[in-house]
Amino acid sequence: MNSITKIYKSKFKERLSPYGFSLYRRTFYRVVNDVVQMLMLYNIDTSYTIAFDVCPLCLGVNDLYCEDVGIQQFRKNNPHNEGWYNQSFFTGQKLSDEEAEIVVDEMLSIVFSHVMPMFERIIDWESWLNDVYRQRVNIGRWEVNIKIGNYGEAILILQEQIERIQNNLLNRDPDYIEKYIREGYVKADYVDEYRARCAAAENETRELLKFYTNLLERLSIPDNEYFNNHFAEQEAKAREYLSNPRKYKQKNGY
């Protein structure tokens, strides 16, 4: 295990456990009312940061991975928004345990000075909607718009999704799988599995198209009972997953 990862898990567990956080892989998480709050050690090559997020359970939670927002934005004198590195710029060598501890301590300090206050604010669906969703003006989700009763916007989003899926299906070369195989992009011992995965992916796409089409039909009514049940089921599934992610992974195979 990388020294930063090992030290991160140890130090963060000691500080976060009293606040009700559990650890799964690299993510510390806790359920508060009807949202889950997450902190995750995230890295690209040798650069590290702590990503954080809050997700409403009613929108569905089936993993504990977040990467949208990192705490490097809160570092002082960091004009290029850089994360922390696991090697010395001068020697190119990996950080010693002592140096890695300094990195993790700085991360932990920023989490408690900037992220934890946000977690104390965003404690339910309503506060998430006002504090997170409405601040991210580039995000448009049909689930949120249905949840808040903005059916007109939800219809537009779903129509765009349906059109994109239909275009992809119509414009797809029906022979693309066999072409990839003939041109050698797929290893010989992987051909059968590749065909099966492609077939499963296409079936999933067609099922998604049916689902979106069904949503559009129900929005035209509107079928409020259906949508209320949908969000209640999403929340129930999220709570089941978050009660024991490891058991859920074993049960579902991912």
Image (tube, rainbow, N blue to C red):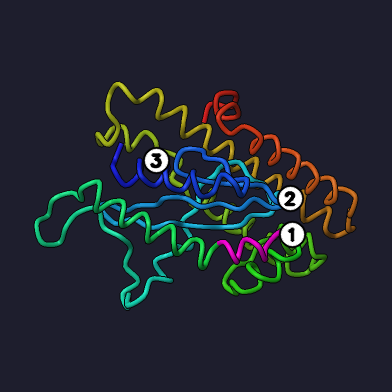
> Residue at label 1?
125
Say which mark, if any, is on residue 58: 2
Residue 168: percent from left, percent from top: 52, 52
- Cα distance between the residues tagged 2 and 1: 8 Å
Taking the view exactly as shown, the residue that stands out farthest to the left is 91
Q: Residue 146's image quarter?
A: bottom right
Left or right: where 187 falls relative to 238: left
Who comes first in sequence, dot 2 or dot 1? 2
Kindly state the secondary structure of the residue where label 2 is placed: helix
Classify 64 as above or below 120. Answer: above
Labelled pair 2, 3 in contact (Cβ < 8 Å): no
Left or right: where 242 falls relative to 193: right
Dot 1 alpha-carbon crowd within 10 angstroms: few under 14, some 14 to 19, many 20 or more: some
Labelled pair 2, 1 in contact (Cβ < 8 Å): yes
Classify 254 as above or below 31. Answer: above
- Cα distance between the residues tagged 2 and 3: 38 Å
Classify 1 as above or below 39. Answer: above
Say which mark, if any, is on residue 176: 3
Q: Nearer the viewer, mark 2 or mark 3?
A: 2
Residue at point 36%, 54% (across, down)? 104
Dot 3 alpha-carbon crowd within 10 angstroms: few under 14, some 14 to 19, many 20 or more: few
Residue 124 forms part of the magenta stretch: yes
Q: Which of marks 1 and 3 is in front?
A: 1
Say which mark, if any, is on residue 20: none
As rendered, which of 54 and 59 lies closer to the eye? Answer: 54
